[in-house]
C-alpha cells in the first residue's frame, strides 16, 4: 500500500510541477506586448504540434495500430469540437466584463488545459508501469514526464494570461491539469499494466484534442495579435525547439 501511495505521489508531482511550472513561467513575464503575444502563442502552437506528431501519434500507433490511433484522434477532435460549439466565446467573456476577445483566449486556455489533463492520465499510467520495472526507471520516467509537460503548461498559461486571467488562477488551472497524472500512476501501479488498445486510443485522443485546439484557436489567435511574420516565427521556433527538446529526452 505504501508503495502504491509513493507511486501516486510521484506521478502527481510529475504532472503538477511540469504543467504548473510552465504556466507560472509565462505569468512571471507579466506585461506582454502584442508582438510578444503573437510570437508566444505561435511558439506554444508549434511546441504542441511537435509533441503531437513526434510523441503522441507515434506512441498511439506503437501501443496499438494505425486504426486504434486514428479512432482516438477522431474521438479527441469530435469531443473538443462539440465543447467548442456548446461553449462559445461569449460564455467565457461573461467572466471578464463582457470582453469577447479576452473571453476567447480564456476559452482556449480552458480547452487546452482539458486536453492536457486528459492525456496526462495515460502518461501517468506509464509512470506506474515504469515503477513495476524498477524504482530508478520509474523515477527517470517521472522526471521526463515533468519536463515534457513544461511547454504544455506554457501553452495554457499564455492563452489564459492573454485572456486576462490572474496569475493565481493560471497556477490553479495548470496544477489541476497535472492531477490526472497522479491518478494514472495509481492505476498503472494497481493494474501492473494496461491494455495496449486503451493506451493507443488514449494517446490518439490526446493528439486529436491538441490538434483541434492548435489549428482552431492558437494559430489563428497568434496571427490576429500582430500583423507580419511574428506568428510564423513563433510557430516555426516552437516546432524546431520542440523536436530538439523531445529528441534530447529520448537520449
Image (cartoon, rainbow, N blue to C red):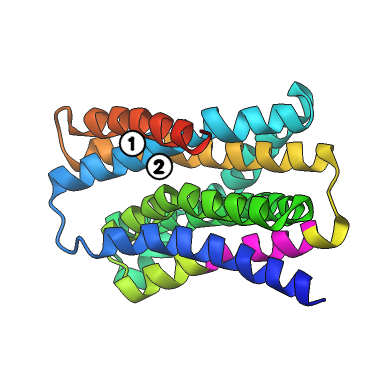
The answer to whether mark 2 and mark 1 are in CB contact below 8 A is: yes
Give the magenta part as a residue range.
176-188
Q: What residue is shown at x 59% (from left), y 37% (from top)?
A: 207
Which one is nearer the viewer's eye here, 32 or 195? 195
Q: What residue is shown at x 75% (from left), y 65% (from top)?
A: 186
Q: Is residue 79 left or right of residue 133?
A: left
As displayed, is residue 229 above or below residue 154?
A: above
The answer to whether residue 65 of the structure is visible from this angle is yes
Q: Which mark is residue 220?
A: 1
- Quarter of the picture holding the N terminus: bottom right
Label 1 crowd (10 A; few <14 / some 14-19 / many >=20) = some
Q: What residue is shown at x 22% (from left), y 29% (from top)?
A: 233
| Residue 61 drawn at (x, y percent) | 71, 27
Would you say the magenta stretch is mainly helix, strand or loop?
helix
Q: Is residue 185 magenta?
A: yes
Which one is nearer the viewer's eye here, 236 or 145? 145
Q: Which mark is residue 71?
A: none
| Residue 212 drawn at (x, y percent) | 52, 37
What is the distance, in whole Å, between disc 2 and disc 1 at their CAs?
6 Å
| Residue 152 drawn at (x, y percent) | 44, 49
Q: Is residue 243 left or right of residue 195?
A: left
The answer to whether residue 177 of the structure is visible from this angle is no
Location of residue 164 by image quarter? bottom left
| Residue 7 drawn at (x, y percent) | 70, 66
- Residue under label 2, please give it: 217
Which one is nearer the viewer's eye here, 2 or 199? 2
As displayed, is residue 43 above or below residue 92?
A: above
Label 2 crowd (10 A; few <14 / some 14-19 / many >=20) = many
Tell how many labels.
2
Q: Is residue 126 magenta?
A: no
Amino acid at each position: 500500500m505504501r508503495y502504491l501511495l509513493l507511486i501516486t505521489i510521484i506521478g502527481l508531482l510529475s504532472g503538477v510541477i511540469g504543467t504548473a511550472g510552465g504556466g507560472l513561467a509565462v505569468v512571471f513575464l507579466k506585461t506582454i506586448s502584442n508582438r510578444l503575444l503573437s510570437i508566444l502563442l505561435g511558439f506554444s502552437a508549434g511546441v504542441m504540434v511537435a509533441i503531437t506528431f513526434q510523441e503522441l501519434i507515434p506512441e498511439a500507433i506503437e501501443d496499438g495500430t494505425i486504426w486504434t490511433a486514428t479512432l482516438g484522434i477522431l474521438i479527441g477532435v469530435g469531443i473538443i469540437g462539440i465543447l467548442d460549439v456548446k461553449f462559445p466565446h461569449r460564455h467565457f467573456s461573461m467572466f471578464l466584463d463582457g470582453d469577447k476577445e479576452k473571453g476567447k483566449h480564456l476559452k482556449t486556455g480552458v480547452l487546452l488545459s482539458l486536453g492536457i489533463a486528459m492525456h496526462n492520465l495515460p502518461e501517468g499510467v506509464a509512470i506506474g508501469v515504469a515503477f513495476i520495472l524498477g524504482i530508478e526507471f520509474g523515477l527517470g520516467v517521472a522526471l521526463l514526464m515533468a519536463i515534457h509537460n513544461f511547454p504544455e503548461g506554457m501553452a495554457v498559461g499564455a492563452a489564459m494570461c492573454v485572456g486576462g486571467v490572474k496569475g493565481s488562477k493560471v497556477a490553479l488551472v495548470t496544477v489541476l491539469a497535472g492531477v490526472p497524472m497522479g491518478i494514472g500512476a495509481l492505476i498503472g501501479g494497481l493494474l501492473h499494466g494496461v491494455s495496449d488498445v486503451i493506451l493507443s486510443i488514449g494517446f490518439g485522443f490526446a493528439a486529436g484534442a491538441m490538434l483541434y485546439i492548435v489549428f482552431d484557436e492558437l494559430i489563428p489567435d497568434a496571427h490576429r495579435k500582430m500583423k507580419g511574420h511574428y506568428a510564423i516565427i513563433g510557430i516555426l521556433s516552437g516546432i524546431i525547439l520542440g523536436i530538439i527538446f523531445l529528441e534530447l529526452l529520448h537520449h
